[in-house]
């Protein structure tokens, strides 16, 4: 069952990263927001796709939480474990933002990301 949880967490990470990619494209969100640009944002296919993926990620979180509740070693704190485990998606988000949106991280930000990943792996043991 833990393998299913890990597989679902990996899938969740990519769904979250894709939603942020589509919602966070600079050409979509940068600049002055007026009622007109806000309207065009709401009907933009990238924004709608990103929002749909974000909603899908929320449903995946419910499934992850349900699965964690069924694992004896995690059941006593399944909601906390689920919240911490899904935070691992941030690593995938950072990689997608780096390779597809050209964002850069400082050394201290990279170290913080590594510490986060190590901490999450400790929570799932």
Image (cartoon, rainbow, N blue to C red):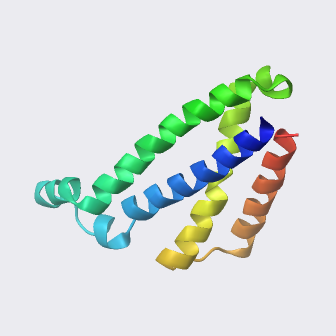
Residue name at image x 16 percent, y 61 percent: 37
The residue most toward the top is 76
Tell me where residue 63 sits by quadrant: top right
Name the quarter where the N terminus is drawn.
top right
Please name whichever residue, 53 or 98, is drawn nearer the observer in this view of the structure: 53
Residue name at image x 84 percent, y 23 percent: 72
Name the quarter where the C terminus is drawn.
top right
Locate residue 86 relative to residue 50 in the image: left or right. right
Tell me where residue 30 sits by quadrant: bottom left
- Is residue 96 something one can see in this rendering? yes
- Is residue 87 something one can see in this rendering? no
Relative to 70, is 37 above or below? below
Please name whichever residue, 66 or 3, is drawn nearer the observer in this view of the structure: 3
Q: Count how many numbered circles sit on residues in the image.
A: 0
Locate residue 94 relative to residue 33 in the image: left or right. right
Locate residue 72 relative to residue 28 in the image: left or right. right
Please name whichever residue, 4 or 102, is drawn nearer the observer in this view of the structure: 4
Residue 47, percent from left and from top: 30, 57
Residue 120, percent from left and from top: 78, 47
Residue 112, percent from left and from top: 75, 61
Locate residue 122 relative to residue 66 in the image: left or right. right
Relative to 45, is 103 above or below? below
């Amino acid at each position: 069952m833990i393998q299913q949880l890990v597989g679902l967490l990996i899938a969740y990470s990519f769904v979250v990263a894709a939603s942020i990619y589509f919602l966070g494209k600079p050409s979509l969100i940068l600049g002055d927001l007026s009622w007109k640009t806000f309207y065009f944002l709401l009907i933009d296919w990238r924004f709608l796709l990103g929002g749909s993926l974000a909603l899908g990620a929320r449903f995946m979180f419910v499934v992850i939480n349900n699965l964690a509740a069924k694992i004896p070693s995690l059941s006593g704190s399944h909601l906390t474990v689920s919240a911490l485990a899904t935070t691992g998606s941030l690593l995938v988000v950072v990689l997608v933002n780096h390779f597809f949106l050209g964002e850069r991280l400082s050394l201290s930000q990279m170290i913080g990301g590594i510490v986060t990943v190590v901490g999450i792996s400790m929570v799932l043991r």
